[in-house]
Structures are given as C-alpha cells and as structure tokens.
Image (spheres, rainbow, N blue to C red):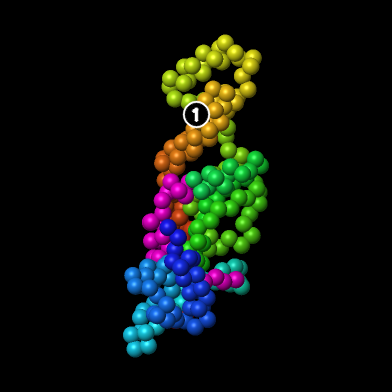
Amino acid sequence: MKKLLESKYNNALEIIEETGKLPMAVIDDGDLEKIQDELEKLGYESYVDESTDWLIVDDARLLIEYGRNKEKSIFAIERKVIEEIIDELDTAEIYKMTYEEALGYSFTGTAYTILDVADGRIFTRWLMQNNYMMDDFGEIVLCSINTPLESLTENDLLDDSELREFHSYIYDNWDEYNGIEDYIIEKYGSYSLDERIWDYIDWLASEYELNYESIKEQLDEVYNRAYTRR
C-alpha cells in the first residue's frame, strides 16, 4: 500500500520543510495517525496544536559527523525508529529485491539491498568487483548477492517425477541436449520456465534470514557518532 505522504498528501513534506507545520484542515478524518506515523519514520516528531488547529512538526533527526576530521555529516532518523523499520521488514521481499537486482548483471560484482538511515528509504544497488561505494556512510546493507548468479540446474527446476523423465531423455538424446532451460521450454513451454524460476526464487527467499549481528554492527558504527541538535 502506498504511503499517504507519497500519494494523497504528496506536497505535505514540502510544506513542512518550509513552515514546520501543516494545517489540520487539509488532513482528512482518519488520516492523522497514519501521517504522524509516516513522519516519525522519516525522523520528524509532531503534535496537534489545538489552539491554532495546526499539526506542528519538528525535525528530530540526529546530526552525525564522520570522516577523518569530521568534515562530512548526515542527518539520521533516530536509531529506535530505524530498528522498528528493520523489525517490520519482510525478509523474503528483501531477498527477492536483491535477487532481482542481481539478475541484471553478468559481470562479477555484488547486488545489495540497502536501508538509508537518513530517510528510511530501502533501495537496491549493484557494484562491480573491487569497486566501492564512494560515500556510503549511513547506508545499512540488509542483503547482498554475488553476481553473476549461478545457473539453475535440473534439481532446482524439476520435481522428482520430472527428473526421472529428464534423465531418461538425456540418456537417449545426450547429443541433442542444449541445457535445462531449453529442455523445459521445449517440454512445458516458456511460461512454465518463468514460473519455475520464480518458484525457485520464492523458495530461496523463504529460507533467507537477515544477518542481525551485521546490521547491529553497522548501526553501532553510525549511531555511536550521533548527537542531538537540541
């Protein structure tokens, strides 16, 4: 479901950044709590000033300085909010996001799914081997998959009964065999191949678990440098 601040109230953040408040008159009944929850996940604290009928919004992000001489800085959402975002993640979806990113590359490298502590945004990125993120401070790696992906085998794409028929086919037609994907297309159709590939990816995703120890270490690296601006 699309967030209210990205759809129904898509200019609200611009107004908040300029004025620090939002008129309650523009917020429909039932939307206030959802908007406040979305604002919290973006690093803002808010309350309703009943005397003026405005939603007052304060930027509660932390200032984090880094670099050899602290010459760089970012504003970050409070750690507890970032941890709540992580706790609510669908780990299977995170794996599938990473896998889909990896699918696009035949070169040696790594596909990443990343959480940005500056705004809570989750996105994917691919880097070629021996390349590094130029300024990745504050980006928490949730999942990574090396590329190129390993080719799927008959054990990944066929069930037990189909494997028996496949092995019989190979025995009789070894000189005509062009690979498991061509075999499935010829035998069952291209739609079946696509369906089997995504069934296999779904299975991999269901087995995937986030490395919470690594995530905690990354969060420590960021938030041990943080201080409030108040």
- Left or right of 156: which side holds 175? right
Say which amino acid is labelled 1: Leu
Q: Is residue 81 magenta?
A: yes
- Vertical placement of residue 29 versus 153, above or below: below
- Give the farthest residue toward the top: 172
State the residue at coordinates (42%, 81%). 23
The residue at which mark 1 appears reads as: 157
- Asked if 19 appears above or below 184 in the picture, the reply is below
- For the point 49% across and 45% down, which residue is it? 96
- Callout 1 environment at 10 Å: few (<14), some (14 to 19), or many (20+)? many
Task: Tell me if residue 59 comes above or below residue 8 in the rendering.
Answer: below
| Residue 101 is one of the magenta-drawn residues | no
The image quadrant where one finds the C terminus is bottom left
Element type at mark 1: helix
Q: Residue furthest bottom?
A: 51
Image quadrant occupied by the N terminus: bottom left
| Residue at image location 49% in from the left, 38% down from the top | 198
**Would residue 77 be visible to someone looking at this image?**
no
Q: Is residue 187 left or right of residue 206?
A: right
| Residue 174 % position (x, y) | 61, 14
Q: Nearer the viewer, residue 52 or 25?
A: 25
Expressed as whole percent of the image width and height from the top left, the position of residue 122 reads: 50, 58
Q: In this rendering, does residue 118 appear at all?
A: yes
* Left or right, 82 with reference to 51: right
Answer left or right for 148 relative to 167: right
Q: Position of residue 207 (x, y in %)?
A: 41, 40
> x, y (%) of residue 6?
49, 66
| Camera-nearest residue between 15 and 58 | 15
Region in magenta = 72-95
What residue appears at the point 57 percent right and 34 percent down from the top-left corner?
A: 150
Camera-nearest residue between 188 and 222: 188
Query: Is 152 drawn above or below residue 50 in the view shown?
Result: above
